Image (tube, grey):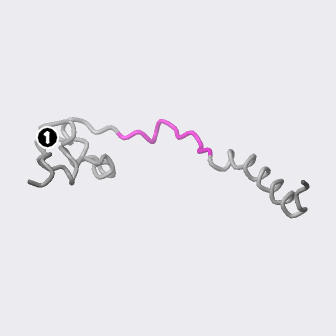
């Protein structure tokens, strides 16, 4: 069973694009200048109790950690709603 000509071109184009996509997706190495260090005095004014309290105060990180704590929103007593 032979493939139609358009299917061959589509397959060849797809293979070419996938083989070249690795260079597009790769990121450049970022230098040491991208590291931000937060010293203890930065957190002192917030009176953190746990390490999670400190993480929540780092700009751009607190909401990304999913710090809902405890059980999920659907967790109940385990008795099936008695």
Which of the 4 image quadrants contains residue 2? bottom right
Rendered position, 30 above or below 63 = above
Rendered position, 16 above or below 7 = above
Span colored in magenta: 26-36
Rendered position, 72 above or below 4 = above
31 is within the stretch colored magenta: yes
- Give the percent coordinates (x, y) of residue 72: 22, 49
- Give the percent coordinates (x, y) of residue 65: 31, 46
Question: How dense is the environment of label 1, judged by Cα within 10 Å: few (below 14), some, or many (20 and up)?
Answer: some
33 is within the stretch colored magenta: yes
Q: Relative to residue 82, is residue 75 drawn left or right?
A: right
Q: How many marks?
A: 1
- Give the percent coordinates (x, y) of residue 20: 74, 48
Q: Nearer the viewer, residue 46 or 13?
A: 13
**Residue at label 1?**
48
Give the residue displayed 30% in from the left and 51% down from the top: 59
- Give the percent coordinates (x, y) of residue 39: 25, 36
Q: Relative to residue 76, is residue 22 drawn left or right?
A: right
Is the C terminus in the top left, top right, bottom left or bottom right quadrant? Answer: bottom left
Q: Secondary structure at mark 1?
A: loop
Q: Nearer the viewer, residue 34 or 7?
A: 7
Q: Nearer the viewer, residue 16 or 31?
A: 16
- Majority secondary structure in the magenta region: loop
Give the residue displayed 21% in from the left and 54% down from the top: 73
Give the residue displayed 68% in from the left and 45% down from the top: 22
Question: What residue occupies the far left of the structure in this picture?
Answer: 82
Is the N terminus in the top left, top right, bottom left or bottom right quadrant? Answer: bottom right
């Amino acid at each position: 069973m032979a493939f139609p000509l358009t299917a061959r071109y589509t397959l060849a184009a797809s293979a070419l694009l996938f083989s070249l996509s690795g260079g597009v997706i790769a990121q450049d190495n970022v230098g040491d200048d991208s590291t931000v260090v937060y010293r203890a005095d930065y957190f002192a004014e917030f009176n953190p109790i746990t390490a999670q309290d400190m993480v929540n105060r780092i700009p751009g990180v607190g909401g990304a950690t999913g710090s809902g704590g405890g059980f999920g929103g659907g967790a109940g007593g385990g008795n099936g709603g008695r």
